[in-house]
Image: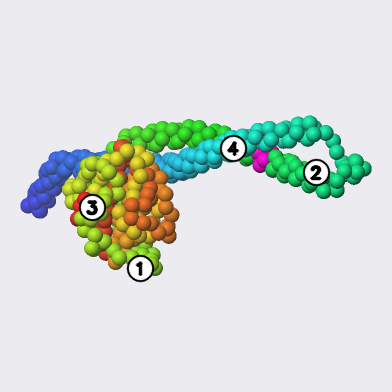
Amino acid sequence: MKLRYLFRNTISLYTLLCVFAFSCSAEPFFNNQNTTNEKLKNVKSEISDAKSQLKNVNKRRNSLENQLKESDISISSITAKIQQNNKNKSEIQNKLKKLEQEKIILITSKQRQEKLLAKQLRAAYSAGHHDYIMLLLNQKDPATIQRTITNYQYVNNARIKEIDSFKQTINELVVVEEEHRTQSIALDKITIDLIANKKSLEKNKDKRTATLALIKKEQLSTEQQLNQLVAEEKSLKYTLEKIQTLAKSSKKLNGLAKLKRKLKWPVAGKIVHSFGTQKHGYIKWKGVLLRAKTGQQVKSIANGKVLFSDWLKGYGLVTIIDHGKGYMSLYGHNQTLLKKVGDYVEQGEPISLVGQSGGQSEPALYFEVRSSGQAQNPKLWCR
């Protein structure tokens, strides 16, 4: 009995010692576990905050890029209006110049006719007034009478002719003066429109500059910049693939294969980024960037058909021309597009004006040559 009691007490004591030992060793374990859970919770919270911030940044950037697109399109539209107004103004000024010359000729003719009529009237007055009855009653030689009547009729007919000519001159002068007045009013209206359009253009340019500044503030990481460029290239590739079907319906074009090193550059300017050089990370330039002046004419490198004429993210206002046989040329960052989809263009024909659309800080032209969808070095064709 004593032995059993002692054993039971020994077991109880051992159990108590084990429990004490376990509780002493478990306390740090549970404390570490709580700390780890707390850190994990904080990390998750930071990740959630980072995702939320990135989402907000992307949202703001998308909004700003849409504003940039609107500004680019507005600037393009206003510039096109200004260009058309300047053209109309020039035409009206030429018309006014011609009308002024016509007016001078008519006034000179009017003055000459006035002098001639005045001379005829003085001659008729000096000769005295004779009518047919008085001539017959004078009982002169009938032959003399007939000659006199004939002379009177000749003079009278000449006078009538001059009077009719004078009337016609007056009517023509009235028409010319009325046309001159109409064209002058039209010129005044165009001048007012030009002033308004130029103010609107400057306002939109300021808006674009402010938008670009805000976009610049939204700093992207290297990875984000790379992803953005990849997305822009994918968008361009998708656009090119989409318009391939339009190229098939084009009239027969001879392509560019036989024109290597024979074509002129679309604009005269310095190449600031060459084909194949590093753009960002592993992304390389698929074309060239030519620095040029704002408003400088961009010309088609060869005959072709316009397949695309619109705004494209990362490239701004873009014109894409099909040259046949799978060859295409692309012109980006334009200020204004002068041709629409479906237009046929000749080699050297103006297709757009240099600008800085698509987020460019300086005016430049982005230029690509593609063969069967693959980017080619433009220097192989242009010299």
Of circles 2 and 3, the one toward us is: 2
How far apart marks 4 and 1 lie (CA) works out to: 53 Å
Asked if the residues shown at circle 2 and circle 1 are in contact, with their CB atoms under 8 angstroms apart, the answer is: no
Query: Which residues are drawn in magenta?
Result: 169-173
User: Which residue matches tag 4?
Assistant: 105
Mark 4 surroundings: few (<14), some (14-19) or many (≥20) residues within 10 A = some
Give the color scheme: rainbow, by chain, secondary structure or one colour. Answer: rainbow
Q: Mark 2 belongs to which amino acid?
A: Thr
Secondary structure, mark 2, is helix
Residue drawn at x 25%, y 54% as measured from the top left: 263
Instruction: Confirm whether the magenta stretch covers residue 312.
Output: no
Measuring from the top left, give residue 157's x and y in whole percent: 75, 45
Residue drawn at x 38%, y 33% as measured from the top left: 210
Of circles 2 and 1, the one toward us is: 2
Task: Locate residue 205: give its quadrant.
Answer: top left
User: Which residue matches tag 3?
Assistant: 382
User: Which residue matches tag 2?
Assistant: 148
User: Which residue matches tag 1?
Assistant: 252
Measuring from the top left, give residue 49's x and y in whole percent: 32, 41
